[in-house]
Amino acid sequence: MGSRGTQGLSAAQTHALDTILGKATPGIGIWLINAMEWRMIDRLAGASEGTYAKRPRETYRRMLVESGVCFVDQWIPENPLTMREHGFDDTAERGPTTGGGALVLDGVAIDSPESVVRHMTEVLIPSIERDIAAFDEDLLVNQLLEREARDQNELGPDILKAPYTDPFARFPVFQYGAYGYEPYFTAYALYGDVMERHFSRSADYALLYNRAAARAISEGALPPYIRIDHDITDSRGTLVSLESLDALWMPHFARCMRPFVDAGVTLVWHCDGNVTPLVPRLLDAGFKGFQGFQYEDGVDYADICRMRARDGDELLIIAGVSVTRTLPYGTPGDVRKEMEFLVRNGPKSRLFLGASSSITPGVPWENLKALVEGFRYYRTHGRG
């Protein structure tokens, strides 16, 4: 399933695929680095200042290669264009979670929990039911394979491209991004029956979608891997109570992930916030890896790395130097020390190194330089 072997792959791509499969490798694979400050992208790419703004895709790819990256799941070369020199582009249009003001969806003013319920029952859930009725598995398989082939071709032989949530997986999501935090979570607390109905129908559609995606991974001999990305934890833990999560969301989430689990695809969860209470639930659902980690929120990286998947396999860990603490506020020595900690406490064979998330503007060049030097060292020398 998806284990296309090494025929036709470069040494860098083989290194990445072998790590995913848990095979012995000469060094540690390096995962995506997403620097957001344009002049730092230029420096990492070995280009003159201003090059990224003129040729973003080419320069971003060059940054990855020059930084030692051999594996990406997200190919997002234009993502840093959402930033300015000192941070978020405050001229960009704001949405429900970024202070966008009054919100109207499909003629429904979202100003109360009841308005959320009205929109979900009258618009959102019926739209999911139409998607179920119109679903075309063969069309989706072809679209997914075309998308991955296009991205892999653009990345070239130095980097292995693997599937990511978008466009490869669907599952029930918490709709705070559409309705805003306060209206949505108030509705969640008051109208659990409506929330579960939404999660259930979303999972019905996701089950169709994910069966097709698992088929695409098999037929296209793609890396048997998907990183699943959905922020449902903050620094305190889960955004909703564990009891409600277990009752309303987790059963539907787990059942729509089954096509991937049954097909032998390694599911990796992106960790924002204190993911600790979610970890055992994800392992029970068949997840076999984690990426990110906000150590300052109390996440015990070493403890997670010692855990096993439900079939006994070693976990796949994408360990990141902290983008909220070490890279912006530490020293080059702190960066090197954290990388050594991540390697020493990581799994023996299924370990990638990267940054814990996107690297925002303002990180000192000396820290970025230390990060990339560490990437190059560990990719060549491994744990030695």
Image (cartoon, rainbow, N blue to C red):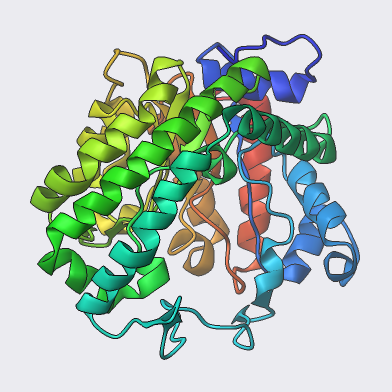
x and y, in percent, of residue 77 in the image: 73, 55
Report the quarter where the N terminus lies.
Answer: top right
Residue at 43%, 56% in the rendered image: 127
Is residue 113 placed above or below 372 in the rendered structure?
Answer: below
- Choose between 377 and 161: the one closer to the eye: 161
**In the image: residue 182, left or right of residue 218:** left
x and y, in percent, of residue 134 in the image: 53, 41
Query: Does residue 26 appear anywhere in the picture?
Result: no
Is residue 193 placed above or below 188 in the rendered structure?
Answer: above
**In the image: residue 223, left or right of residue 324:** right
Residue at 31%, 21% in the rendered image: 309
Q: Quadrant of residue 143?
A: top right
**In the image: residue 226, left or right of residue 253:** right
- Choose between 112 and 357: the one closer to the eye: 112
Is residue 92 placed above or below 15 in the rendered structure?
Answer: below
Is residue 313 placed above or below 200 in the rendered structure?
Answer: above
Residue at 28%, 48% in the rendered image: 199
x and y, in percent, of residue 80 in the image: 68, 66
Q: How many numbered markers are drawn?
A: 0
x and y, in percent, of residue 359 in the image: 58, 62
- Choose between 217 and 199: the one closer to the eye: 199
Query: Does residue 364 appear anywhere in the picture?
Result: yes
